[in-house]
Image (cartoon, rainbow, N blue to C red):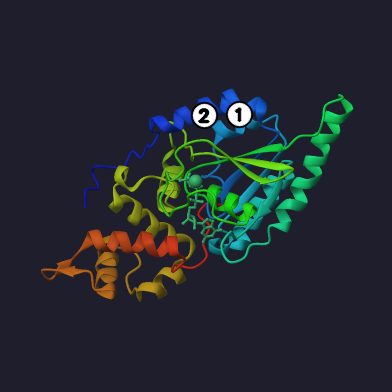
Amino acid sequence: MNNENKTNINWYPGHMAKTIRELKEKIDLIDIVFEVIDARIPMSSKNKDIENLIIKKPHILIMTKADLCDENKTNKWKKYYEEKGYVVILINLLNNPNMRLLFDKINPLINEINEKRRSKGLKPRKVRVAVLGIPNVGKSTLINRLVGKRSTKVGDRPGITKNLEWIRINDKLELLDTPGVLWPKLDEKSAYNLAAMTAIKEEVLNLDDVAIYVVKKMLSCYEENIVKRYSLTEKKDIVKILDEIGQKIGAIKNNETDYERVYRRIIKDLQDGYLGKITFDEK
Ligand SMILES: Nc1nc2c(ncn2[C@@H]2O[C@H](COP(=O)(O)OP(=O)(O)OP(=O)(O)O)[C@@H](O)[C@H]2O)c(=O)[nH]1
Ligand SMILES: [Mg+2]
């Protein structure tokens, strides 16, 4: 374990800066914004650079991955954002999501925009919605759900969408799919939360740091879940805990714990929901 090499997680490749630049250029073309965040990290997954860019646009805050979050905690965040004036939707985009919920919120905005055009003597036109957010939160999945078929690429890694892409939804609506963007200097807590929830490319991470962060966070907030998952008897000494997990999952090499496998399993279990429904941002 290279604990002395403390992670200074940062992932702000050129395409993210380029996306922000292109969005700034296009912002006047955009009528409405869907800001997509991860319900498990409602604060860490909200990008201030995006917030600043869209401050004057009507927008809807969409919290995805509702199936994986701790509803109790996430609902507090939902309420917090609602009190700040946001229209918020908490949604599970897998398993037949009810997109009516979203259309019910967009339709009044569409009507309002067309009404404004009409009052200026302009013809109604397709309303343009930009779907923005950090990597891997489900922006493209959301668009596919709205179109009703797979029209843009999705994947369980960050950085799947590479370019801005307009997608027609119906006669009234057009959506802009965008690559996920982070911001240049991540604070440590957000960085670990983002890393744990796969918003950051694996290649730039020290998996040991991320996995240990997850274990500690689980022990402090969801002790029962992690103890049960790996039949832990140890709850304090991190090396002993990792050894116990190694034993439990059979990650043993030459009679020693295969830590690399242990780290990967912990992170994967978290992401796949095997550590229970969790929310890592505290409200
Ligand atoms: N469990 C769960 N998984 C989801 C949900 N929404 C999206 N996903 C998964 O999250 C992963 C990322 O989805 P994408 O739609 O590619 O995410 P994106 O925001 O477009 O990502 P980038 O293009 O990389 O910025 C995929 O594996 C989806 O199946 C959800 O509500 N619940
Ligand atoms: Mg995408």
Q: Nearer the viewer, residue 29 or 200?
A: 29
Q: Residue at x 82, y 30 (%)?
A: 123
Q: Which residue is mark 1?
A: 53
Q: Nearer the viewer, residue 39 or 235?
A: 39
Q: Which residue is mark 2?
A: 20
Q: Nearer the viewer, residue 139 or 227?
A: 139
The label on residue 282 is none
Residue 188 visible in the displayed image:
yes
Q: CA distance from mark 2 to mark 1?
A: 9 Å
The answer to whether residue 248 is left or right of residue 215 is left
**Does any atom of ligand 1 lie closer than 8 Å to the CB of label 2?**
no
Q: Secondary structure at mark 2?
A: helix
- Indicate whether 116 appears above or below 236: above
**Is disc 2 in contact with disc 1, using a CB cutoff of under 8 Å?**
yes
The answer to whether residue 207 is left or right of residue 163 is left
- Indicate whether 75 appears above or below 32: below
Q: Residue at x 58, y 56 (%)?
A: 149
Residue 219 visible in the displayed image:
no
How crowded pointer 2 is (Cα within 10 Å; few <14, some 14-19, many 20+) is rated as many
The answer to whether residue 149 is left or right of residue 247 is right
Label 1 amino acid?
Leu
Label 2 amino acid?
Ile
Q: Secondary structure at mark 1?
A: helix
| First in sequence: mark 2 vs mark 1 | 2
Task: Where is residue 209? Give x, y as percent.
Answer: 31, 50
How crowded pointer 1 is (Cα within 10 Å; few <14, some 14-19, many 20+) is rated as few
